[in-house]
């Protein structure tokens, strides 16, 4: 800390000592090297005599002896460096005080003193104050490293910037190249900025230094050397897996397993088994490894690893379409394990996973509840330096879902505020920033599509593709469909369908099938769309994706309307519309109500005159509701279609004034968004 800050701290607890400290530092800094040597000689005299000033075994005595010993070990060049560093430290403070005195002439000294005290003692530590400015002692370096590691884990924004931290670590390593912990923090820092080369280099240096210093051998007997090697291989496998180098990861993992088996290290083997499952998952689906890992972890008393295994198992089985109630029961059991062992980080992960699973099943209300539960929870883990453990990946996931849920309901200002908060909490250079970047791009894309600005939506596709290639290709197909480039959109969707079926991404398979069905409608191939929709419905029901199943039923109802059986369409609409209105996005609610109105109008053709008027009146009310939904998300194309149909119905009922109003609004929207010769009402969405 700065000298002025140190003086203020001493004055608070011992005022007369502060002056002595300043005088002694001034004598040394403005004197010669022998003055500093004299100071250390005087310290040694404090222990001599029958009644020494300081007892050797007291806290102060131990500190002074440690300091004298460290000074005596220094070479001449190191003593000189220490002296020049002391001079610079004192002179820097003197210059600052001189500048402050010039400013004081025009202000009230008492007010300024109070202001300085508040700023210096209560204000947050600036980055240059956190950073180490010269050679540090072993304890200081260890404190600096542990503090930065804790901040990187719990609140990355409060840690030093990647470049500044690396500069400080290089400074530490310059004075002590064999400082293993500094290499490990350098590895963590390189991972933040996705630097493959530097992170690998630092990780290997960490384990090399660990073996060279003999730290492992002292604490683990003869097993120390082998222990470092097997954990080095395991960490290297995890690093390669993180960057997507699965072949290299597998080779490193095989090496870790071999050494762990030779040493009979069951704990290391369980960690290897969990990573082996992650690698095998990239090739084929297998729960056997994971189930074995969970059982063995519980047997060897590794609750953290067991819980992660249970959560991975739940995730895998959710994608495989297992019963939702059994999965939630499994998560409940793992939560009991978390609370029993106070594993707060895993409690956060569990709640974030529940949010994602409810979103997968299409239950937005439940997802919203889980998201708010996590955000209102206080962490169990005590984190020092005033840091709250709320900058983890779990919080990023939950906030992203919350932003998308608000955007779906038309609350774009609220979604924008959440994303702004995410940008502040997870800056672009942080490791979890890609999550909010993807959601931000998707929300912007949906808004551009709703507004009919397809050129803007098309420009966002590149950004989405960079973050998620599958999502990017799907969005590109949607833009091509909206621009009436049917054949190009169909080719893209066919390729995407084959790929998603191969990697078993069922949710995207269903979305692609629904999009293809709409292409067939627009190409007047209504009968071809039916088997595609039935295939999508079978998949949605098999994998418990209720919301996608409801959306597919709505599409089937539209197909029946087009094929001339509106009565049947109305019957199946009653089955599907409730989940959509309860959990659906505002746009989907509007489309559902618009479809109900279309079916009512088509069915009314065979009714008696009185019953026909009642049906048309009901259709107008449904159109009003649909109009309010579309207006909420600023969906101009759909609004135009609603106004067109409403004007026709009002004309039929003889309500001229209302018809003219709808016709005028329709004309304004039609001039803004010309239809380019495409029929106005030709699709469900």
Image (cartoon, rainbow, N blue to C red):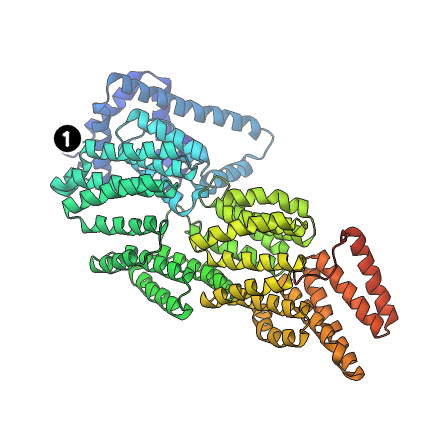
Q: Could you say which is closer to the camera, residue 165 or residue 404?
A: 404
Question: Dot 1: few (<14), some (14–19), or many (≥20) neighbours within 10 Å?
Answer: few
Q: Position of residue 20 (x, y in %)?
A: 35, 30
Q: Could you say which is closer to the camera, residue 398 or residue 421?
A: 398
Q: Residue furthest left?
A: 222
Residue drawn at point x = 39 percent, y = 59 percent: 315
Q: Position of residue 557 (x, y in %)?
A: 62, 70
Q: Position of residue 449 (x, y in %)?
A: 65, 52
Q: Horizontal placement of 314 versus 660: left or right?
A: left
Q: Quadrant of residue 381?
A: bottom left
Q: Could you say which is closer to the camera, residue 682 or residue 119?
A: 682
Quadrant placement of the C terminus: bottom right
Q: Horizontal placement of 401 versus 244: left or right?
A: right
Can the viewer see residue 407 in this picture?
Answer: yes
* Residue matched to label 1: 49
Residue drawn at point x = 48 percent, y = 56 percent: 398
Q: Position of residue 264 (x, y in %)?
A: 15, 48
Residue drawn at point x = 63 percent, y = 45 percent: 458
Q: Horizontal placement of 54 versus 387: left or right?
A: left
Label 1: element kind: loop
Q: Is residue 408 above or below residue 62?
A: below
Q: Is residue 143 above or below residue 453?
A: above
């Amino acid at each position: 800390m700065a000298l002025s800050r140190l003086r203020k701290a001493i004055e608070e607890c011992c005022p007369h000592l502060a002056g002595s400290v300043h005088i002694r530092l001034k004598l040394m800094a403005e004197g010669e090297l022998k003055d500093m040597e004299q100071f250390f000689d005087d310290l040694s005299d404090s222990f001599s005599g029958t009644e020494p000033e300081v007892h050797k075994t007291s806290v102060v005595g131990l500190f002074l002896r440690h300091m004298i010993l460290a000074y005596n070990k220094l070479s001449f060049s190191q003593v000189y460096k220490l002296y020049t560093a002391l001079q610079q430290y004192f002179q820097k403070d003197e210059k600052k005080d001189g500048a402050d005195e010039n400013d004081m002439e025009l202000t009230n000294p008492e007010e300024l003193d109070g202001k300085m005290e508040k700023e210096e003692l209560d204000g947050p530590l600036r980055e240059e104050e956190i950073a180490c400015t010269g050679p540090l002692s072993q304890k200081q370096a260890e404190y600096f490293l542990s503090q930065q590691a804790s901040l990187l884990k719990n609140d990355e924004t409060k840690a030093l910037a990647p470049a500044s931290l690396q500069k400080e670590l290089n400074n530490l390593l310059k004075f002590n190249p064999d400082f293993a912990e500094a290499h490990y923090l350098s590895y963590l820092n390189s991972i933040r900025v996705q630097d493959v080369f530097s992170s690998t280099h630092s990780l290997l240096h960490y384990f090399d230094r660990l073996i060279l210093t003999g730290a492992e051998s002292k604490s683990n007997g003869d097993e120390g050397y082998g222990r470092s090697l097997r954990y080095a291989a395991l960490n290297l496998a995890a690093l390669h897996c993180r960057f997507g180098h699965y072949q290299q990861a597998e080779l490193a993992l095989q090496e870790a397993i071999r050494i762990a088996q030779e040493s009979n290290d069951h704990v290391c083997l369980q960690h290897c088994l969990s990573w082996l499952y992650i690698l095998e998952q990239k090739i084929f689906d297998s729960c056997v490894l994971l189930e074995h890992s969970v059982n063995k972890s519980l047997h060897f008393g590794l609750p953290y690893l067991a819980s992660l295994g249970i959560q991975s198992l739940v995730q895998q089985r959710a994608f495989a379409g297992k019963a939702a109630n059994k999965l939630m029961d499994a998560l409940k059991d793992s939560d009991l394990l978390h609370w029993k062992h106070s594993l707060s980080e895993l409690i956060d992960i569990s709640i974030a996973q529940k949010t994602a699973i409810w979103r997968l099943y299409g239950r937005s209300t439940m997802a919203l509840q889980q998201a708010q539960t996590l955000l209102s929870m206080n962490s169990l883990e005590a984190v020092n330096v005033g840091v709250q453990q709320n900058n983890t990946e779990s919080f990023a996931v939950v906030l992203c879902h919350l932003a998308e849920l608000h955007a779906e309901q038309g609350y774009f200002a609220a979604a924008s505020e959440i994303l702004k908060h995410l940008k502040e909490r997870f800056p672009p250079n942080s490791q979890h920033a890609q999550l909010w970047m993807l959601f931000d791009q998707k929300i912007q894309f949906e808004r551009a599509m709703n507004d009919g600005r397809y050129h803007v939506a098309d420009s966002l596709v590149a950004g989405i593709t960079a973050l998620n290639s599958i999502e990017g290709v799907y969005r590109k197909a949607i833009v091509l469909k909206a621009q009436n480039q049917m054949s190009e959109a169909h080719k893209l969707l066919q390729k995407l369908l084959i790929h998603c079926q191969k990697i078993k991404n069922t949710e995207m398979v269903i979305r692609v099938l629904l999009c293809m069905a709409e292409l067939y409608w627009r190409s007047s191939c209504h009968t071809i769309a039916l088997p595609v929709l039935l295939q999508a419905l079978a998949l949605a029901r098999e994998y418990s994706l209720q919301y996608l199943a409801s959306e597919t039923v709505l599409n089937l109802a539209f197909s029946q309307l087009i094929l001339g059986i509106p009565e049947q369409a109305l019957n199946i609409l009653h089955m599907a519309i409730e989940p959509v209105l309860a959990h659906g996005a505002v746009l989907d609610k509007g489309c559902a109500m618009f479809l109900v109105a279309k079916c009512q109008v088509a069915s009314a053709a065979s009714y008696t005159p009185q019953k026909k008027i009642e049906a048309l009146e009901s259709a107008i009310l449904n159109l009003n509701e649909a109009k309010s939904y579309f207006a909420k998300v600023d969906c101009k194309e759909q609004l135009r279609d609603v106004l067109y149909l409403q004007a026709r119905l009002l004309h039929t009922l003889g309500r001229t004034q209302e018809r003219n109003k709808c016709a005028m609004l329709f004309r304004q929207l039609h001039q803004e968004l010309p239809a380019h010769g495409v029929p106005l009402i030709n699709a469900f969405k």
